Image (cartoon, rainbow, N blue to C red):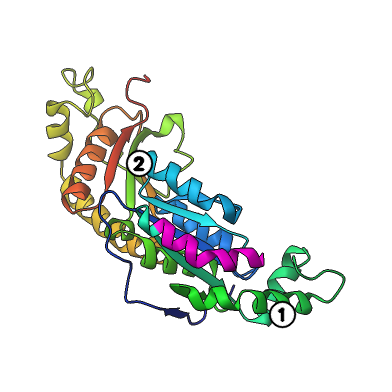
Amino acid sequence: MSSESVTVTTSDSGPPEQDEQTLRLVVVTGMSGAGRSTAANALEDLGWYVVDNLPPTVLPEVCTQARENGISRLAVVLDVRTRSFFEQLPTMFTDLTAAGTMPEILFLEASDDVIVRRQESVRRPHPLQGDGRLLDGITRERLSLATLRAAADLVIDTSSLNIHQLASRVAHAYGDASDDQLRVTVVSFGFKNGIPVDADLVVDVRFLPNPHWVPELRPQTGLSAPVREYVLGQPGAEEFLQRLQELLEVTAKGYINEGKRFATVAIGCTGGKHRSTAMAEEFGRRLRESGMPTKVLHRDVGRE
């Protein structure tokens, strides 16, 4: 997928309203090579319960089980090239709606030349190609899916989208307001024990005086009020926290645009007991106050 313009058409102005008892169902389907798996992964990242390669005939039972188990958002990826599904679709959706499900269809498509390029890149035959040419299989599939495309609530042409842009489009259509936010994990650590392998951003607070050399503070951690006050009261601590927050706010916008929803900020000192712990706690508090979903972990506290 390239990184050019986006083509999206939809039959309505947005998702339908949903009450607490209603199951929202999105049927993900479309052309082979158009990005069904990418769309499914994006929905899963948004908190949807996703079922892949589901036979259409068992869809009503899956919806029943989902409602009984408290699932409110269900996405199913269907291979719907069988003509029987087209015949059953209107009745099936009517029955699902009556049973408390709001069904929608997300249809993914791409131009012939793009699908040819994608199929050739993965070196897999088209499912309708048979003994003929790849383009013949694409043509057959496009014709067989024309009725379903016409019934779709949302059609996304992925010809000019990369995987991040497609994920962003799916998030815009099917995410909650909170899904547009970056979820941050702030981790304190000690450099002597190694940098966290999952860190996206690593900062060093060893420029601050070490409470280890203050006898009454040495046995405590950065979770205690005396150590926290000592660390946060040092020259440069406040400016550091302010600038780190400004940096993360800029970075978060880029992460969201690239489809990244989670980030780990690692704050390190020598042992991970005093300075990094106090700074991580304070940084996490500020992020939460700003409205950014944040959790704080202390990897090395108690490790010494």
Vertical position of residue 139 compared to residue 106: above or below: below
Q: Residue at x 23, y 20 (%)?
A: 218
Q: Secondary structure at mark 2?
A: loop
In the rendered image, residue 46, in percent from the top left (x then y), is placed at 40, 54
Q: Is residue 202 left or right of residue 110?
A: left
Decide: marks 2, 1 in contact (CB < 8 A)? no
x and y percentages locating residue 232 in the rendered image: 15, 39
Q: Residue at x 69, y 70 (%)?
A: 118
Residue 206 placement (x, y as % from top left):
31, 38
Q: Amino acid at mark 2?
A: Gly
- The one nearer the camera, 164 or 138, is 138
131 to 225, vertically: above or below: below
In the drawing, what numbered circle is on residue 90? none
Report the span colored magenta: 81-96
Q: Residue at x 35, y 77 (%)?
A: 12
* Residue 211 placement (x, y as % from top left): 22, 27
Confirm whether residue 158 shows in the render: no
Q: CA distance from mark 2 to mark 1?
A: 41 Å
- 97 relative position to 30: left or right: left
Classify mark 1: residues with Cα within 10 Å, few (<14), some (14-19) or many (20+).
few
Residue 70, numbered label: 2
Reply above or below: 62 against 91. Answer: above
Amino acid type indicated by mark 1? Thr
Q: Which mark is residue 139?
A: 1
Closer-to-camera residue (71/157): 71
Image quarter (top left, top right, bottom left or bottom right) of the N terminus: bottom right
First along the sequence among labels 2 and 1: 2
The overriding secondary structure of the stretch rendered in magenta is helix
- Residue drawn at x 45%, y 60% is 26
Q: Quadrant of the C terminus?
A: top left
Q: Where on the picture, by quarter, is residue 255?
A: bottom left
